[in-house]
Amino acid sequence: MLKNLVIETLKQGETFRENDDLLYLTICVKLYSDRGSITNMTVGEFFTSRKSYGLPTFESVSRCRRKAQEENPALRPREAIQKGREENRERFYNFATKQGEFAF
């Protein structure tokens, strides 16, 4: 269900393909819309109640986006965004592997 909602949202425009924060907010708004508006919640209320509201984690939405974009190239962002994401993955990998050398 979540993956289908993510795909539906990605089809709505490039903005959602390029901005995981906006994608996440939109998914949460759609899932919570029958009970009210999450945009009126405080940040604290959102994070402490997210599970009881049945809202997904940011990581789940991000994984669904990556999988959907892997399976359907038409849902991918502009080339510049894809390149930037790849560079960030490489930087993190290099950081993480160097950190691992000093771990006890």
Image (cartoon, helix red, strand yellow):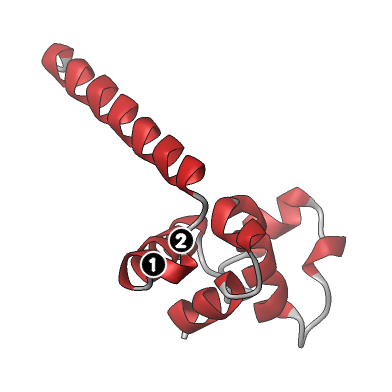
Question: Which residue is depicted at the point 36% across and 31% down?
Answer: 87
Give the image location of residue 35, x and y in percent: 78, 84
Residue type indicated by callout 1: Pro
Image mark count: 2
Q: Nearer the viewer, residue 79 or 30?
A: 79
Assign a secondary structure to mark 2: loop
Number of residues whose C-alpha sits closer than 10 Å to that of mark 1, classed few (under 14), some (14–19) or many (20 or more): few
Q: Which residue is mark 2?
A: 76
Residue farthest to the top, as pictured? 102
Number of residues whose C-alpha sits closer than 10 Å to that of mark 2, classed few (under 14), some (14–19) or many (20 or more): many
Give the image location of residue 56, x and y in percent: 52, 68
Instruction: Using the image, tell me which numbered label, if any, was put on residue 40.
Output: none
The answer to whether residue 94 is above or below residue 62 is: above
Residue type indicated by callout 2: Arg
Residue farthest to the right, as pictured? 40
Q: Would residue 12 be found to the left or right of residue 96 on screen?
A: right
Q: Would residue 74 be found to the left or right of residue 31 on screen?
A: left
Question: In the rendered image, which quarter is residue 59 located in?
Answer: bottom left
Question: Which residue is depicted at the point 32% across and 65% down?
Answer: 70
Question: Which residue is depicted at the point 44% across and 78% down?
Answer: 3
Question: In the rendered image, which quarter is residue 71 located in?
Answer: bottom left
Q: Badges 2 and 1: C-beta atoms under 8 Å apart?
A: yes
The answer to whether residue 46 is above or below residue 84 is: below
Q: Which residue is mark 1?
A: 73
